């Protein structure tokens, strides 16, 4: 991923995600669209946990990994962890996806069933098909709040105990989000990574509010910019706006990183073959034979123009179009090409075609 600029829109575990991508050569831009506000000291959560200990549930629905872990941590901070784990160990635990199951297992507990689609709808469908009448169902909710499970189970005769462990808050740095949105629209970002549906929705809403939805969607659609999400649920706010995202087979950060890396490895494998080695143009840099070139933004655009021509000649007027300003001075073109040759270290990479313009020297044309 050398030369790739990756926008991380998550707050939680963003450091881990960024480090994994940086180890593979990416440059990270961080702009979390939402913050996560834990409820560790929330009196209502602790009271609900104590009530659950006194009145054990028959079924426990774990909707998120981070929420389930935070619940156990909050109980531990108030001396309730041992009692809570005992009660949970005697209940049937249903997980809304692999991350929730992982958190349950990390607490030393076992899940009875996991929703493959990672949706509350599947959880409701399975439990209702089995019948919940007369059962006590405890539901650990995710940051977006209630998702309809409380009402559905209550209407079917269950006694429901909701537990809200954390909630989504505003972006910690709204200016960073606004800047990231504009950068995406301007073509400065190679990939945008999403790890939650609320976060994806919040970032896309920022895109809409900035009035650059068409530009951002266009870049996603053409492949100039890549959307990568941790799973199908996270992808839904993107799909609703016509954006197709990369998804790993398993909803894990490590799998997400591998999927994104694999995407760029494929791109690099079909890079433009030049006499100086494979050439790949990223959003803000160019990579020649595995090395990031020391180019200015203008240099990148001129090289992008040459690469897009696929070995055919581009005219001086075409070069002038991507140079800053409105000058029609042919000398500016000569300077730009000379600087580009110097930066690539290969004078034979860009050939001057007398009275016509310039072209890249490819290995196969």
Image (cartoon, rainbow, N blue to C red):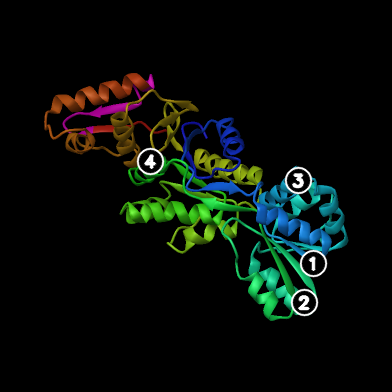
Q: CA distance from mark 3 to mark 2?
A: 31 Å
Marks 4 and 3, the one that precedes in the sequence? 3
Task: Give the structural element (helix, strand or loop) at label 4.
Answer: helix
Q: Position of residue 339 (x, y in %)?
A: 28, 21
Q: CA distance from mark 4 to mark 3?
A: 37 Å
Badge 4, how many Cα within 10 Å: few under 14, some, many 20+?
Answer: few
Tag 4 near tag 2, CB within 8 Å: no
Badge 2, how many Cα within 10 Å: few under 14, some, many 20+?
Answer: some
Marks 4 and 1, the one that precedes in the sequence? 1
Name the residue rendered at 59%, 39% in the picture.
Answer: 17
Q: CA distance from mark 4 to mark 2?
A: 47 Å
Tag 4 near tag 3, CB within 8 Å: no
Name the residue rendered at 47%, 57% in the picture.
Answer: 201
In front: mark 1 or mark 3? Answer: 3
Instruction: Answer with left or right where residue 13 lies relative to residue 238.
Output: right
Instruction: Check residue 59 in the rendering and tell me which mark sits there, or answer none.
Output: 1
Tag 1 near tag 2, CB within 8 Å: yes
Marks 1 and 3, the one that precedes in the sequence? 1
Q: What residue would you read off at disc 4?
A: 175
Residue 126 position (above or below residue 344): below
Q: What residue would you read off at disc 3?
A: 78
Quarter where residue 325 is shown: top left
Instruction: Check residue 140 in the rendering and tell me which mark sits there, or answer none.
Output: none
Instruction: Check residue 132 in the rendering and tell me which mark sits there, or answer none.
Output: 2
Stretch in magenta: 344-357
């Amino acid at each position: 991923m050398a030369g790739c600029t990756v926008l991380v829109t998550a707050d939680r575990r963003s450091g881990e995600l960024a480090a994994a991508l940086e180890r593979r050569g990416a440059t990270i831009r961080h702009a979390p669209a939402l913050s996560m506000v834990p409820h560790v000291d929330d009196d209502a959560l602790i009271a609900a946990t104590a009530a659950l200990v006194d009145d054990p549930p028959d079924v426990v629905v774990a909707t998120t990994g981070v929420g389930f872990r935070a619940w156990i941590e909050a109980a531990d901070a108030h001396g309730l962890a041992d009692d809570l784990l005992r009660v949970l160990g005697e209940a049937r635990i249903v997980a809304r996806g692999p991350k929730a199951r992982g958190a349950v297992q990390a607490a030393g507990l076992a899940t009875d069933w996991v929703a493959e689609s990672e949706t509350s709808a599947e959880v409701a469908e399975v439990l209702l098909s089995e019948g919940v009448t007369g059962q006590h169902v405890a539901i650990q909710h995710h940051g977006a709040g209630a998702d309809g499970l409380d009402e559905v189970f209550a209407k079917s005769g269950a006694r429901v105990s909701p537990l809200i462990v954390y909630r989504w808050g505003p972006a910690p740095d709204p200016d960073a989000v606004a800047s990231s949105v504009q950068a995406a629209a301007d073509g400065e970002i190679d990939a945008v990574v999403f790890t939650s549906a609320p976060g994806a929705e919040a970032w896309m809403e920022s895109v809409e509010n900035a009035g650059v939805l068409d530009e951002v969607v266009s870049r996603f659609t053409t492949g100039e910019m890549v959307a990568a999400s941790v799973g199908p649920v996270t992808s839904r706010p993107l799909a609703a706006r016509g954006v197709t995202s990369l998804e790993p087979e398993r909803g894990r950060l490590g799998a997400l990183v591998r999927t994104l890396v694999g995407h760029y490895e494929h791109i690099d494998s079909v890079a433009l073959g030049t006499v100086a080695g494979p050439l790949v143009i990223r959003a803000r840099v160019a990579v020649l034979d595995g090395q990031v070139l020391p180019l200015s933004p203008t240099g990148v655009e001129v090289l992008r123009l040459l690469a897009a021509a696929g070995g055919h000649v581009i005219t001086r007027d075409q070069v002038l179009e991507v140079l800053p300003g409105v000058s029609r001075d042919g000398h500016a073109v000569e300077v730009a090409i000379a600087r580009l040759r110097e930066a690539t270290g290969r004078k034979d990479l860009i050939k001057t075609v007398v009275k016509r313009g310039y072209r890249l020297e490819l290995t196969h044309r």
